[in-house]
Amino acid sequence: MNEPHSKQTAAPAIAHGLRGVLAAETRLSMVDGNAGRLVIAGLPLEELAPNATYEEALHLLLEGHLPDEHELHALRSTIAGLRDLPDLTTTALREAARRRLPTMDALRIALDTLALEDDDPNDTSPAADRRRAHRLVAAAPVIVATYRRLADGHEVVPPRTDLAHTANFLYMLNGDEPTPERTRALETYLVTVIDHGMNNSTFTARTIASTRSDVLSAVVGAVGSLKGPLHGGAPGPAIDMVFEIRRRAARNGRSVPDEAEAWTREALERGERLMGFGHRMYRVRDPRADVLANAADALYRAGDTSLLDDAKAVERVILQLLEEHKPGRRIQTNVEFYTALLLHGVGLEADAFPAVFAIGRIGGWTAHVLEQRQQDELIRPDSHYTGSTDGTWQPVHERTPSRAAPDAPDRPGGPSTQ
Ligand code: ACO
């Protein structure tokens, strides 16, 4: 009865992984994978990322234009005024820290608790949605900083309203005011990743919003999507790879490039994917990698550059071997490789990297949710069924026993698994 149906008609063409499918119209960002170009609401990434504050980029996405001084001041105050967390959120974070959950899981759990403070969850007016968008943007870094303090066994540092978005996050993480260099480096990162076309997590957020569900649900779903190593979970493994190659080089008395070659060949032979390389959209270098490489250069230049130098050597070797491995596929460095170096340079632990990505991307997610709301069209693709169609109902005692899992207990009256 479970055999595929023999009379099935020829399989229709399926856009596996939705490759190349245009799923939405957006004014928020454009990814040109062949030219290696990213435009965010009209501004090339290279213009926006090194110059804008996070609040400016957020205003650009939510309101469609860069803010004037008055608008920027207003948005800064709004975000700064939305930083306090409900007690229950902090309680949930304490429990998450006791259980040593990954920071990304703590962020997802804590964001969900913000529903407890929404006095009118049925109000889905544009003004209410925008308020929620601001609240989520403001709360995400506070949640992550609070969690990191708790997870590391430190006192929580309360947020400050006199600091801008990025500086406040670093202040809460470390308990002292960050240097302008570290703030600029992190700000460049957060703006760089604020939006990126119809990536998986943004598509997830839009899909949820398309059912007329709420902004919070859409963002919580997007966090779940971003967590995966094929999306936002790559930078931790990327920096671990550089550290492992360095350790092995020291142990084996080899140079970092030589060890990188041996390590990479082994990994590719095992069929592994190298984190921080390859992209669904780009056939050339991810433009975000260059912007972040420049920001990382500026950050590391002030001190010890050996990690950055070794990472660049590893990158060169990997690119060469990936070209050998998949000739002509042009697998290039993606955003995550330099994300890892930059966030490490700012003083963050690898466990926090995906959550910091979410802090950046949340501006894009919320803007997409608001855009989707205006378009108000249910996203609902189709699927091609490959199972049987001629089953008949049998009462449970008449069914043929299926093969039991090796550790499954014997069913009463059923066959022994011995
Ligand atoms: N290392 C080794 N092989 C790779 C890599 C890689 N990093 N990337 C692609 N390939 C291989 C694939 O296994 C595939 O091989 P196959 O044809 O034998 O199955 C071939 O190259 C072609 O892959 P694509 O179709 O280009 O890859 P896809 O679009 O499905 O996936 C992805 C893109 C998921 C990013 C992939 O390149 C990857 O797994 N990279 C490593 C993880 C990573 O860095 N993720 C972060 C992405 S950036 C972001 O989401 C913010």
Image: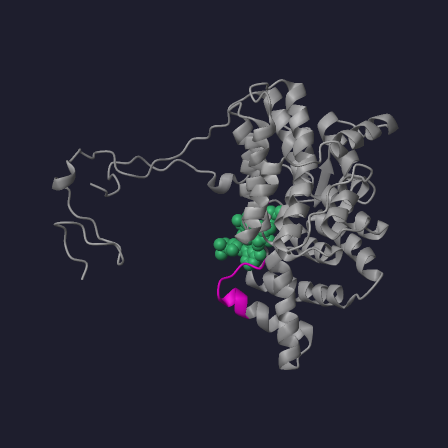
Quadrant where the C terminus sits is: bottom left
Q: Is residue 149 above or below residue 362?
A: below
Answer above or below: position of 304 versus 397: below
Q: Nearer the viewer, residue 276 or 146?
A: 146
351 versus 270 height, above or below: above
Going by the image, does 80 lie left or right of 367? Answer: right
x, y percent for residue 50: 81, 45
Q: Which image quarter: residue 113?
A: top right
In this orientation, does residue 273 appear? yes
Instruction: Give the dominant element type of the magenta stretch: helix, strand or loop.
Output: loop
Residue furthest to the right: 69
Residue 298 located left or right of residue 385: right
Residue stretch rendered in magenta on the structure? 266-280
Q: Residue at x 50, y 27 (%)?
A: 379
Expressed as whole percent of the image width and height from the top left, the position of residue 84 reads 69, 36
Say which of 298 and 322 sits in front: 298
211 versus 280 height, above or below: above
Residue 172 magenta-highlighted: no
Pick the residue in front: 413 or 319. Answer: 413
Residue at image coords 57%, 30%: 115
Q: Is residue 270 magenta?
A: yes
Q: Quadrant of the N terminus?
A: top left
